[in-house]
Amino acid sequence: MLGEVLRAPGLLLLIDSAFLTGRRVLYSFIVAALRRAERVHVFGFEVPEEEYWAAVPLELSSSLTFHDGFSNPLNWEKSFHSLTLRDISVQGIREQVGNPAGPVTIVLDSLSWILARCPLFYVCHLLQELSGQQSEQGDAHLVALLHADLHDPGELRSVEQFMVSDDLSLEMTSQMDKEREDNASVDPTVNLTFNLRLSETERKCKESLALPYTFTDSKKTSLLRASSGSAKIFYDPEPIDDMDEDDPDDDLDV
């Protein structure tokens, strides 16, 4: 069943946590892709290259390419180049993968490392573009490892996931879309202690009710009618006002 999942083009997201690691499952997907004679490109940031070679059988290792982002992430060592954030782009990854003659599997290890350094919208665009990529003679599969306990729920809901339906068919969906569907089916007025809806009679009474401080047409006309005399300002002092005609500023603390 897992092999069938990996054959489906698009994004396969492996979500794990500190209590249940998904790295061994990730390695099993890589080995399964290699056994199907696919080219596998691993963009690794969390573990050294040696761990991958130890997990892959020797006879399959020639089809695996490891793009090192772990050994020298800041490129302080000038003797060799390591992946940087500039390489984590649609164009950068496509250039490094090239155009292999056959299906290809791209592995991001891990997506959490990228999310910690790139905006969420940028990562979502990256996943969308790479999951739709096609090689010369086959589809491109994208596999990413994500550590759920390193991100807030909003980020996790923004990443597409594969859902397995009752008939075992695969459907790529979004958790946010699922929540919107669930919220749309919920009636917020159920089990309330007060009524939010109006009957037809109540609605007509509400529409015919004159709101307070609402001017009638005749009052608006009288207020807006131009006056023939000069304008005047009327001031009604409060009891606490200190009015001194000889010294108007007497109440100021100067």
Image (tube, rainbow, N blue to C red):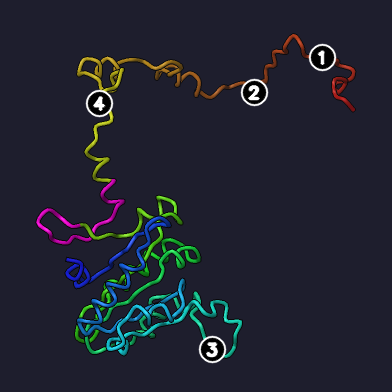
- Identified by mark 3, the residue type is Phe
How far apart are labels 2 and 1 at the CA level? Answer: 26 Å
Q: Nearer the viewer, residue 247 or 153?
A: 153
How far apart are labels 1 and 3 at the CA level? Answer: 83 Å
Residues shaded magenta: 164-179
Task: State the quadrant of the N terminus.
Answer: bottom left
Residue 34 drawn at (x, y percent): 25, 82
Q: Which residue is mark 1?
A: 242
Side (left or right) of 89 relative to 76: left
- Identified by mark 1, the residue type is Asp
How far apart are labels 2 and 3 at the CA level? Answer: 84 Å
How far apart are labels 4 and 1 at the CA level? Answer: 59 Å
Q: Which residue is mark 3?
A: 80
- Above/below status of 60 relative to 5: below
Residue 227, picture quadrant: top right
- Above/below status of 189 relative to 48: above
| Earlier sequence position, callout 2 versus callout 3 | 3
> Disc 2 vs disc 1: which is toward the camera?
1
| Earlier sequence position, callout 1 versus callout 3 | 3
Callout 3 touching callout 4 (CB < 8 Å): no
Residue 218 drawn at (x, y percent): 41, 17
Residue 146, picture quadrant: bottom left
Tell me the number on the disc at residue 231.
2
> Disc 2 vs disc 3: which is toward the camera?
3
